[in-house]
Image: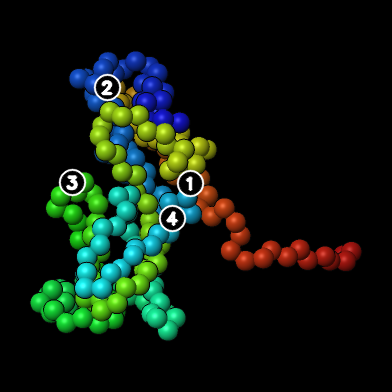
Amino acid sequence: MTTTEVATYANEEGLVIGAADINLQVRLRRKVIPKFEMDVGEAAWRRKQDTLSISANDRDYDLPTDFGKMLTMPLYRDYNEAEFSLDYIGEDTARMARARATTETGSPNGYWIERLTATPKTQRVLYLETIPDAAFTLYFSYLQEIYFEDNTTSVDLDQFIPPKLQWALVEGLKMEIYKNRISVDDPRWSITKAEYDSYVVSAMEYREPGARRAVKRVRTGPI
């Protein structure tokens, strides 16, 4: 389903006439989809893996545009193939200040994340606590957030959300329409809210496409 189709299905009653009335594409991209992502939380279909090529003497690196949250401690291996992980120090303001002030190089053992000041501002920058003295590859997993370059270009949501869960966005957008178009005692909003909540529950149950451990059948004899 595309973002255009979501808006079409949500407005089947024709309660919204054009973008100058209620801009459904803006509400879908900036409110309904972010709310759905927050409601669902971490799910396998939102997790992605990536790498960063770290260079000697360079501390900061752009993360993917769709980066939402780091899910693991980033890992790297040195020239002896020894594995190291980076601690998140974003909550330790003193430690970040010391890292900013130092010009010494070495093996990084911590990192923090800041937002880009240039466009797109949704993109994040990873800063290493120690300026690296050698090149290496950083491995990490992160939670994806859908990034929209604008509020008009139609986007195929199949690349981000399983098709069986996408109708939640239709119900979420319907709620936005109903809040502006129907009276408080109209049951349509409550019905739509229940439908949306049901899809969220289904999405949370659909977190993993496989079993976490082997499932064994136990054969029992006659009772």
Dot in front, 3 or 1? 3
Q: CA distance from mark 4 to mark 1?
A: 14 Å
Dot in front, 4 or 1? 4
| Residue 203 in picture, x, y percent from top left | 48, 46
- On the rendered image, what quadrant is the C terminus found in? bottom right
Which residue occupies 41% across, 25% down? 5
- Whichever of callouts 4 and 2 sits on the residue coming sooner in the sequence is 4
Secondary element at image label 3? loop
Q: Which of the 4 quarters of the picture holds residue 69?
A: bottom left
Q: Nearer the viewer, residue 99 or 94?
A: 99
Numbered-mark total: 4
| Residue 175 in picture, x, y percent from top left | 33, 31
Residue 221 higher or lower than 157, as above or below: below
Q: Which residue in the protein does label 4 denote?
A: 47
Q: CA distance from mark 3 to mark 1?
A: 32 Å
- Whichever of callouts 2 and 3 sits on the residue coming sooner in the sequence is 3
| Residue 144 in picture, x, y percent from top left | 37, 52
Q: CA distance from mark 2 to mark 3?
A: 36 Å
Secondary element at image label 1? helix
- Label 3 Cα neighbours within 10 Å, binned few <14 / some 14-19 / many ≥20: few
**Residue 119, labelled with which disc?**
3
Dot in front, 4 or 2? 4
At label 4, which amino acid type do we have?
Answer: Arg
**Residue 181, labelled with which disc?**
2
Q: Which residue in the protein does label 1 denote?
A: 203
- Label 2 Cα neighbours within 10 Å, binned few <14 / some 14-19 / many ≥20: few
At label 1, which amino acid type do we have?
Answer: Ala
Secondary element at image label 2? helix
From this viewpoint, which residue is outermost toward the left?
Answer: 101
Q: Which of the 4 quarters of the picture holds residue 147?
A: top left
